[in-house]
Amino acid sequence: MNKQLQITIVAIAILVGGYFYLSSGPAFDLLSSSSEEKMPSHVLSEALAARFDYLSKNGNSSCSASFRSSIPSMADDDRLQGSCCSPMSVHRYSEQVEGLVKFKAVAGQNIEKIPDDPYDVEAGLAKELMSYYDLELTPEEQKAYDYAMQNSSEKGPCCCKCWRWYVYGGLGKYLIKNHGFTGEQVTQVWDLSDGCGGASEHHH
């Protein structure tokens, strides 16, 4: 047996032995389909987790009328942060932010004025959206808005008539009038943008 053939046989033996060793050990489990099933289906990115940690502890948002009336005097680069009513839920927060990313990834729905994070809204954008709340809609457009009012989780842009009600109500009217959004689409935006806090309305 020549030297080259001996080397080839040894190499094959090592490969075969290595395969059976890996297939019987924990290393193989990392590559198996069953290990994927053991992995959590919803993994929060470090950046999103850090953002949640900050917003849940440093929010300035309030349901009060005085807070709503203070928004027009804020600097445009100020931010409205945190939840209004209940403490933020990390699970629900991640669902909402990721849901908005998916929503805006659909053709015709990537509208810049839809806030990417309902718990972190720029004051300048909030002012602009509030100004749209008084937009007059055509009867057909009003039907779309009324549909969202009836079918959204909060039966409106928010659970109460705080600043979010007028900001997201204005957003809904803007989307219907300027981008032809349907009532179903506005309902999705409102549900994904609910800023009341809490762990309700989990969408899987």
Image: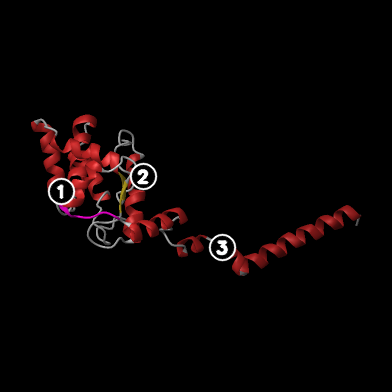
Q: How far is disc 1 from disc 3 in space, using C-alphas?
A: 47 Å
Q: Residue at x 43, y 57 (%)?
A: 50
Name the residue carrying label 1.
Answer: 156
Q: Residues within 10 Å of mark 3 (few under 14, many from 20)?
A: few
The range drawn in magenta is 60-65
Q: Position of residue 183 (x, y in %)?
A: 17, 40
Q: Are marks 2 and 3 in contact (CB under 8 Å)?
A: no
Query: Mark 1 against mark 3, which lies toward the viewer?
Result: 1
Marks 1 & 3, CB-CB < 8 Å contact: no
Closer to us: 172 or 84: 84
Q: Secondary structure at mark 3?
A: loop
Query: Which is nearer the N-term, disc 1 or disc 3?
Result: 3
| The N terminus: image quadrant | bottom right
The residue type indicated by label 1 comes to Gly
Q: Nearer the viewer, residue 191 or 159?
A: 159
Per the rendering, the mark at residue 101 is 2
Principal secondary structure, stretch drawn in magenta = loop
Asked if residue 138 lies left or right of residue 17, the reply is: left
The residue at 67%/62% (across/down) is 19
Q: Residue at x 13, y 43 (%)?
A: 147
Q: Amino acid at mark 2?
A: Val
Who's the residue at 32% across and 61% down the image?
89
Asked if one can make out residue 192 in the rendered structure from this viewpoint, the answer is: yes
In the rendering, at what x and y percent does residue 153 appear?
A: 18, 53
The residue at which mark 3 appears reads as 30
Q: Which circle, 2 or 3, is nearer the viewer?
A: 2
